[in-house]
Image (tube, rainbow, N blue to C red):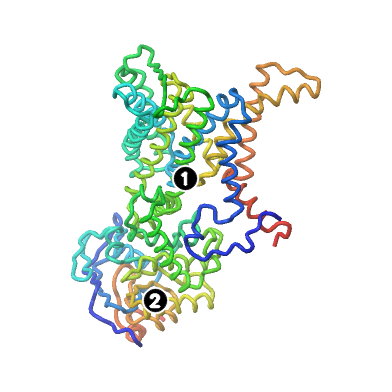
Amino acid sequence: MLYRENGQFKTSYADDQQIFPIAQDRWLIIGLLVFAFIGVPLLVDEYLFRAILIPFLILSLAALGVNILVGFCGQITLGAGAFMAVGAYAAYNFHIRVDGMPLLVSFLLGGLTSALVGIFFGIPSLRVRGLYLAVATLAAQFFTDWVFLRVPWFTDNASSGSVSVSNLHILSWEIASPLDKYLFCLALLTVFALAAKNMTRCAVGRQWMAIRDMDVAAEVIGIRPMFAKLSAFAVSSFYVGIAGALWGFIHLASWEPAAFSVDRSFQLLFMVIIGGLGSVMGSFFGAAFIVILPIALNQFLPALGGLFGMTISTAGISHAELIIFGALIIFFLIKEPHGIARLWSTGKEKLRLWPFPH
Amino acid sequence: MSREIGEVILDLKNVSLAFGGVKALTDISFDVREHEIRAIIGPNGAGKSSMLNVINGVYRPQQGEIVLRGRRFARMNPYKAAQAGISRTFQNIALFKGMSVIDNIMTGRNLKIRTNLLLQALWWGPARREELAHRAKVEEVIDFLEIQHIRKTPVGRLPYGLQKRVDLGRALAMEPSILLLDEPMAGMNVEEKQDMCRFILDVNDQFGTTIVLIEHDMGVVMDISDRVVVLDYGKKIGDGDPDAVRSNPEVVSAYLGAGH
């Protein structure tokens, strides 16, 4: 009954084109943000920050990037891990090679480098689509794996290809404790999520979606496929690159190319498929599902076993975790192929009419 | 009638198009005058849709040229055609299924967008103003086509007749000078056809848009068009005002078969 838009009249197109045209949604999001910035730091311990919240935030950003390309522009990619790696290593090189380079600037430059590489590997999309494009982007994955392992310059001649960063700070703010890291990631994610939402509701987003839905018609009304596709590759790779830099600098602090293997690419693709293709919100749902669920199962299963007087071995738990996780993915995809975001919006639509469904 | 038919603005000269060994169009020439409604008719497979595809550059003819307001195009492409003010609708509705009606029609404004990606990402001054200005224009189209009630519905959920109307709306949002309509009334019931006829005549009358139209419903074609081209097996077999075409023996035999 609370979720009603009665009496909320729009008197201008600006009102109607807000991100959250319904006041309750607006308040919910503002509340969530306030909670994330102020409430969470008061409630949560270090372990949760390190193991769940920071990975969740960073992978949400990466999933958002993948969603721009796969969900909004319809160009499938298996190279997300590669662009994370490019972002991380490029930011690393700017960080160590240029004296006094501010952290944020090296992140942005890392993202831009990743965008350029993304444009390069996006060129095949002008000719091929679907599975063939997926294979072409897979090339990016194997190429970067090889480059960062074999070309010592990129890793500052570290013998194992492993690099590390320390002493990160923005002006005088030292990003050392898990709380600092969490706030830093959260702030970046908020900014980038807002920018993504803006792009997808503006002309450029419509160009991407037009190319996704019907490329011939898009061309006929004056959308250049080359610009639309390559801009999607660029923006997507930029986001993924920034996420990669965060993953390396903030989450891992020292990493090797294996951190951005093809497994990561698949993981990100699954996130957007489960979360909801073509939905900014969906990227967060997907990341939450994939990051949090395995850990939750891990904690929950022994307790469940104990309830029935069984003790489950550690190996048993990790097996069961995979089985249940896989089953849930299949269940969601059968039940709602458009992902959790669609469930969410259908739920909201029903709630607006509840308790009278017609 | 308030509109006055003007000079020739689109002139097709000796266009031939073949797909491998199949000749879709053979040496076709005809012209379109400003502000007129020009119909292209013919039996199935006569090459009507191919003709439209040639005009807006989806297909490249092997021979012939297109003269648009005195500019010669040996090779047209869809982007150039759109810039030159040609827009079109599709026979099998080619809407963007995942987008709402508003967004679909907004894509028609694409060529008029001036701000760049960065401004749009920030929803910054000019980008925001531009977006709202285009929204106002799109609302005019929505009012014109009487689809206010479905403006936020995803087009995939709309019935066929309304989808056709949205398709027309997207083409109109470009503010075209020439509008190509590929079977705008196919598969519609009588009332929907009447509505569509009214919209086509209104577009022509109010905005002075030149219309090139493919249609199978002879009653409609003969009623609303100023001149008619008849194609059969990729060749032009008739051209003229509706009455002349109706009494052309070649046209009659193409439609009814030889020994009628």
Inter-mark Cα distance, 2 to 1 = 39 Å
The residue nearer to you, when weighing A75 against B127, is B127
Please tell me the numbered disc located at residue A194. Answer: 1
Check the picture and name the quadrant holding the C terminus of chain B. bottom left
Helix, strand or loop at label 1? It is helix
Question: Are there few (<14), some (14-19), or many (20+) residues within 10 Å of tag 2?
Answer: some
**Where A248 falls versus A19 (above or below)?**
above
User: Where's residue A316, x and y in %?
Assistant: 68, 19
Residue A86 pos. (x, y %):
37, 29
Q: Is residue B78 above or below residue A78?
A: below
Give x and y (percent) for residue A26. 57, 51
Which chain is indicated by disc 2?
Answer: B
Viewed as shown, does residue A284 lie left or right of A7? Answer: left
Q: Identify the image quadrant of the N terminus of chain B.
A: bottom left
Secondary element type, mark 2: helix
Q: Measuring 30% from the left and 82% from the top, which residue is drawn there?
A: B240
Q: Is residue A166 left or right of residue B60?
A: right
Q: Residue at x 38, y 13 (%)?
A: A160
- Residue holding disc 2: B203
**Mark sitting on residue A248:** none
